[in-house]
Amino acid sequence: MFLITAKLSLKDSLKHPLFTVLMMAGIVVSIFSMTTIVAIGDGTRQVIIQTLQGFGFGGDVMMVAAGGGRIFRHRPSGVKTLTPADATALKQLPFVKAVAPRQGMRRYPVHTVGHSYQTRIMGVTPDYLRIADFQIDMGRPLDERDLRDHRKVCLLGRTVANKLYPGNRTAALGQFIQIGKYFFRVKGILSEKGQAGRFDMDDRVLIPLTTSSTLFIRDDYLHAISVKLADAKGIERYQREVRALLRKRHHLTPDQPDDFRVVTSLDVVKYVNKASRELTQLLVRIMIISLLVSGIIITNVMLASISERRVEIGIKRALGASRRDILGQFLFEAVWLSLLGSLLGMGIGILTAFLLKSMIPVAITPRPFVLAVVFGIGVGVVSGAFPAYRAGQIDPIRAILGGRA
Amino acid sequence: MRPVISLEDITKHYQTGKVITEVLKGISFSIHPKEFVAIMGPSGAGKSTLLYILGCLARPSSGRYELDGVDVGTLSDEALSRQRNAKLGFVFQSFHLIPQYSALENVLLPTFYRKDRKRGQKADRRRAKELLDLVGLDARYHYRPGELSGGQKQRVAIARALMNDPEVILADEPTGNLDSRQSEEIVRLLKELNERGRTIILVTHDPDVGSQARRMITIRDGLVKSDTPCS
């Protein structure tokens, strides 16, 4: 019986192409936009996660950043709350394996004879390479004597070396480059680390922390301290202890907020999840609106279609169709058209996502497919129910007599 | 022989607002298998209402209607629909074919609502074609109603009425929209079917058509005025 209902409804909707197309139009558009939004949202989240992984945020690293407030924000300039003494104190903690205090400057011009490039200059200690997981490709790493003597030496990221010595970055080794008004000898070139999301990990120049303090920042406060832990397990407890220690060292009273942030990979995960929850909520809202709009379109087009097909319904009733048969046929019609429209919209959406791939991050996940199917059937049932019921209630005699006039 | 249709004191009234219109005021008669009955009367006499009650499309306000031994007054919509599908074949004044369907699909339509599956789809198609051949429409199986003349449309409708092998054919002014030549052909076809054993009830206000039946029931003001065999 169900097969016959299905067959009849397919057949009849194909015989009324205008109504069929109109009914599908709304849902095609809404599922199309939803698929695109999901693809962009998922793509963005993947980029965020990749970026964080690229920053070397393993489970056994926490980062202490200067200044209080939200976890992720633009680096405040001139926050002077974090000092080398803090780094030394942190290193004394039993669960801390190593610390990497650092100063960082926003993009700064770097010159060689004939080439200039703007890059990030970071003042670091020798431990930084290990904690942030950088390798030396050529030359030698920074050492304690560079630090002690405030030497003007530097390590170039792969991108910077390529920009300053195009075609032959190895030539950079041992050369002098100009950073601001000072000349630095290139001591080494870092191995390629690649992109962290959209962030180029190789676009940086590392110099001794002491050198950056004297020449650039002209003060010894730190922007951040990476802390490598002996083990990753007690990270939440360690985070509390680090926080307690710094509050004590900074003489903060209980009513004062932190003037630093202690960020762990757990916080990062929480942050990403929160962002993704917000995205999901936005999606849900868009979905509800789409649902309403496409549902209203389907309901109205179907009501119009049914009043157009009154005589046909009357004839079918006379020939033995029960109310339930008619209701079933129209409900099925709403469901399959809505499902087809959803799948079509999803197809166009995925296609669009592919086309957008070069411009913005997108990810194709199974989520749009599941949503399209659930949506398609749901909208069909909900919006088809009332018109289908009305169709079943049509009085066959009146419908047939109406056709006589 | 048991009557295929038996009406006992059937009344029907419609209520519009506070006004009650009595259309049928107590109609009783029986029709036996293989009869060819014309129901006649002026327009407004209630003959169409009677036909729709006979056709299980409307329920009487009171009285008892037995179709093939089943009291249809108490049946649910589902069961009543099954009665229509299995036991009745309709022929309408304006043909009422479904314009998007081919002739063959129109003839097959009643099988879609048949609840028993005693014939398969292939057998249904074969029978539909045979019926179209029988009414003289061979070689036009796939024509749309729009491509057929009025007489041809009515032949398709008659083939459709025969599709589920019903007990009774109900024809409501089947010649009303046809010219005289086509009317004659349709009436001749109905007579032929009757001679082959079909029970036919024909509603008409045209005495020329009505006189072709073998029994004539005349309705006036909601009552049976006369019930006579024709010559």
Image (tube, coloured by chain):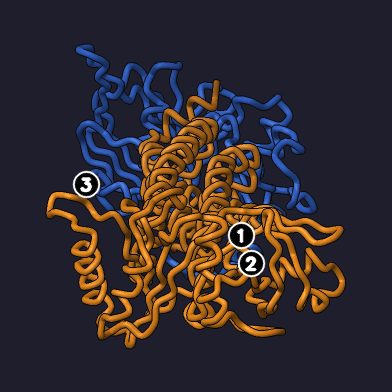
Chain colours: A orange, B blue
Q: Position of residue B109 (x, y in %)?
A: 56, 52
Q: Is residue B162 above or below residue A185?
A: above
Asked if residue A322 shows in the view, the reply is: no
For the residue marked with disc 3, what is the amino acid?
Thr
For the residue marked with disc 1, what is the amino acid?
Arg
Residue nearest the viewer, comparing B225 with A214:
A214
Give the chain letter at badge 1: A
Asked if residue A239 shows in the view, the reply is: yes
Pick out the residue farthest to the left.
A254
Q: Name the residue tied to disc 2.
A: A205
* Mark carried by residue A32: none
Which residue is located at x 58 percent, y 80 percent? Answer: A142
Q: Position of residue B40 (x, y in %)?
A: 45, 25
Residue contact between numbered discs 1 and 2, judged by CB atoms under 8 Å = yes
Q: Position of residue A351 (x, y in %)?
A: 67, 56
CA–CA distance in space, label 3 to label 1: 89 Å
Q: Position of residue A312 (x, y in %)?
A: 53, 38
Give the chain letter at badge 3: B
Q: Name the residue tied to disc 1.
A: A120
CA–CA distance in space, label 1 to label 2: 6 Å
Q: Name the residue tied to disc 3.
A: B74
